[in-house]
DNA sequence: CGTATTTTGTTTAGTGACGGCACAAAGCCA
DNA sequence: TGGCTTTGTGCCGTCACTAAACAAAATACG
């Protein structure tokens, strides 16, 4: 009586992204008959992935009320690990992008990736045991370009890791050695990607990018600027995983020299250090540049004219760069993270005006939004781990 | 006894792009059993789309020799129309991208699009009647950005057409009024797109881009520079058809002013006029700028040092722009058209070196090739028309 | 030169996913 | 209370596809 196999994946994706609250809309979205949609939902329920409300939800409209469809409250979770300049942490993320649990996190990152990832995976394993839930996969977010198909971290930013380290293999080995029980092939695939890319993916599925067809994400951490692109719901990482290196677009022909040989690059003109410099502040060594810049905006943007004009200068340059990207990629939404998130929060109108002015077809209505998730990289890493399940639940999790 | 429906489209695409010379490899490519592949091939043959060799082709290897699979020699054709600054023409293109017939072409383009397209469609209708072959669809290539989903030509370059004219609707109406018999919905869809985009699509399927996963195409006509992107075999035109407007990337911070307000844009630094100016030649009014620039390279690149250094200057700037695009898009191949095609033909090594030097991850091996098709835009327009057939042959052409 | 091997193509039977349809259920509306 | 509307389910037929056996046409090898 088990019907519905080819529609299993799409159906789960719809529930996962919150676009299928009932079996009725699932029927419409899949373009199948009610019988098939019902069978698909039953199958997903049997797999322990979704839950069907026993009581019909009174919608208030006419006709028989439908039963609510939701993510299974105690279904499988994905193990997500994030490494960044200030530390690393593990987390469990359920379907729907909900953070189930987070490890305390460690504040220092050892020079040996195997050491760091081993510790993180150990923490994740502990979380898994405490939660008692099944693990559907594992994903890792790193602050580096990750090349495909090798899975090596080409430029681990602000980490003592050796550039080019085979971080995916190391992660996979750590998972294997820690004895984390994972479905699918053995040894387990240690899905790994750049953190900004993963943040973009998470924002697309569960955050400010929800519903967009083509989403452009731009953001900055401590130094430099990164980009990410989600096309038709899938991360575009290019032929070898190195797409969206947007840092060296020229945004100010008379700007300062960049190590790339050019001058006025987005990288050096719109990062936290650029804001501090433009505001005439000396960067202190105590906290991260991102925190210092964000704090500067928070506390002095309203009161200090120099800070305000520094912010506006960065907004103008960012707008120039965004316009170039919009002209090339023609997304239908832009989401900004890191320091750029703060910029759009305080000077959104100015930023939109600059982009509209410099983009060719007057993309005046281009929605530019601030990132909305608290732990985007972790959710995105989980998204990576969920991907095989979302494509074919039966093969991955089937008995 | 008719098996194979969901695999019909993929199978036809494989034959269409020359990746399925026999039923055996079709079996492997589709990932189905021999029985299914055989049924699929039989179905496509019954639809008059492909032909199976009656005699086995002696391959020389062991085992039973397989029968060759090819495009049906007298199968349906697509009606392709191209409009450009120097005129317009109609053509018939068969599966596999083979030009079956071309109208003489008219050398002047009237200010009224309906007049021009009516004449072109009339010529195409005549070609169809003379060939006696069925028409599978019609496609139009225009030298303008075409916005989606409206299908209007936003900036018809070097034409007297009014910007924003609803060229797709006009084309569809001309097809309808001319009485061209088309399968599918009525009124017929007048598939229309930008000519450079269509050239890129054609190059990807039947030319220098064949086999590439992500193909970046850049080229210039008379003035300005355009780009196109084929991702996983499909044209990426963005959310509203306006992607790949690459003309205003900054390639020379100290370059000349551009109407966009910036300076040193790819648009004005690497087009035919830029070459003539750099070589110290006055552009004559007699022939097109593209022809003058191409002729200059052909006849004087070898002999005149000023011409050679002008070419090299353009190559350096083009390389700068290509590097930016490669950093953003990470394609696995680049194809250049128009004047840029000539540049890569005479200074390919220099161009590759510049791109390798300025691209972040040392994409030194990035293949940069010259476009290889004679009538790329026409073939691409036909490709557009074929698309519904390639996706679901039975629904479109089925009895 | 004949037989084994290898690869390709076809026939047959069986399975399983899906659509179509009828029916039941559970709310609004008059 | 009896329609009306929408949702959910059971049943059956259809058909695309797999599996497996068979047939065909070449080469490889003794």
Image (cartoon, coloured by chain):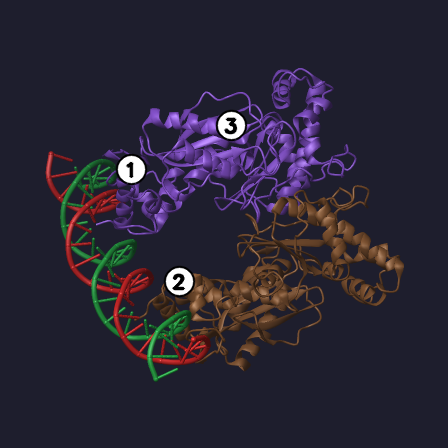
Chain colours: A brown, B purple, C red, D green
Q: Is residue B97 above or below residue A307?
A: above
- Mark 1 = which residue? B48
Instruction: Please identify, in this view, whether the residue under mark 3 or under mark 2 is nearer the observer.
Output: 3
Q: How many residues crowd around disc 2 within 10 Å: few (fewer than 14), some, or many (20 or more)? A: some
Q: Is residue B6 above or below residue B57?
A: below
Q: Is there one chain holding both mark 2 and mark 1?
A: no
Which residue is more in the foreground, A35 or C21?
C21
Q: Is residue B68 left or right of residue B168?
A: left
Position in image of residue B108 (x %, y %) = 55, 22
Instruction: Please identify, in this view, whether the residue under mark 3 or under mark 1 is nearer the observer.
Output: 3
Which residue is more in the foreground, A9 or B321?
A9
- Mark 3 = which residue? B116
Q: Real-space Cα distance between discs 2 and 1?
A: 32 Å
Q: Chain of mark 1?
A: B
- Mark 2 = which residue? A7
Position in image of residue A66 (x %, y %) = 44, 74
Which residue is more in the foreground, B345 or B80?
B80
Position in image of residue A189 (x %, y %) = 50, 62
Which residue is more in the foreground, A198 or B377?
B377
For label 3, the SS is helix
State the count of labels: 3
Q: Chain of mark 3?
A: B
Q: Chain of mark 2?
A: A
Q: Is residue A183 left or right of residue B5?
A: right
Q: Real-space Cα distance between discs 3 and 2?
A: 47 Å
**Residue A160 can be seen, yes or no:** yes
């Amino acid at each position: 009586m088990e019907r519905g196999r080819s529609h299993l994946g799409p159906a789960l994706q719809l529930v996962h992204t919150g676009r299928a609250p009932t079996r009725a809309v699932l029927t419409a979205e899949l373009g199948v008959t009610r019988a098939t949609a019902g069978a698909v939902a039953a199958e997903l329920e049997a797999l322990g992935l979704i839950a069907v409300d026993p009581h019909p939800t009174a919608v208030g409209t006419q006709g028989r009320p439908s039963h609510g469809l939701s993510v299974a409250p105690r279904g499988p979770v994905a193990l997500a690990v994030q490494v960044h300049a200030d530390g690393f942490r593990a987390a469990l993320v359920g379907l729907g992008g909900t953070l189930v649990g987070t490890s305390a996190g460690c504040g220092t990152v050892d020079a040996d990736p195997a050491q760091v990832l081993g510790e993180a995976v150990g923490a994740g394993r502990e979380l898994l045991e405490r939660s008692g839930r099944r693990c559907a996969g594992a994903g890792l977010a790193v602050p580096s370009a990750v090349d495909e198909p090798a899975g090596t971290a080409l430029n681990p930013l602000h980490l003592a890791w050796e550039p080019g380290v085979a971080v995916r293999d190391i992660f996979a080995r750590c998972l294997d050695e820690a004895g984390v029980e994972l479905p699918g092939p053995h040894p387990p695939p240690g899905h790994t990607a750049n953190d900004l890319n993963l943040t973009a993916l998470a924002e697309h599925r569960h955050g400010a990018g929800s519903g967009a067809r083509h989403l452009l994400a731009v953001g900055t951490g401590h130094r430099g600027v990164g980009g990410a692109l989600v096309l038709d719901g899938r991360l575009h990482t290019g032929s070898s995983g190195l797409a969206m290196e947007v840092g060296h677009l020229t945004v100010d022909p008379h700007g300062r020299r960049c190590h790339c040989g050019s001058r006025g690059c987005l990288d050096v003109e719109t990062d936290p250090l650029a804001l501090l410099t433009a505001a005439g502040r000396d960067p202190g060594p105590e906290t991260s540049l991102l925190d210092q810049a964000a704090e500067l905006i928070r506390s002095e943007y309203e009161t200090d004219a120099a800070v305000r004009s520094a912010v506006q200068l960065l907004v103008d340059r960012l707008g120039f760069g965004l316009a170039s990207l919009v002209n090339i990629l023609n997304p239908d939404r832009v989401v900004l993270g890191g320091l750029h998130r703060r910029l759009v929060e305080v000077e959104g109108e100015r930023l939109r005006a600059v982009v509209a002015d410099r983009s060719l077809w007057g993309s005046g209505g281009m929605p530019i939004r601030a990132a909305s998730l608290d732990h985007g990289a972790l959710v995105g890493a989980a998204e990576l781990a969920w991907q095989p399940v979302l494509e074919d639940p039966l093969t991955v999790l089937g008995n």
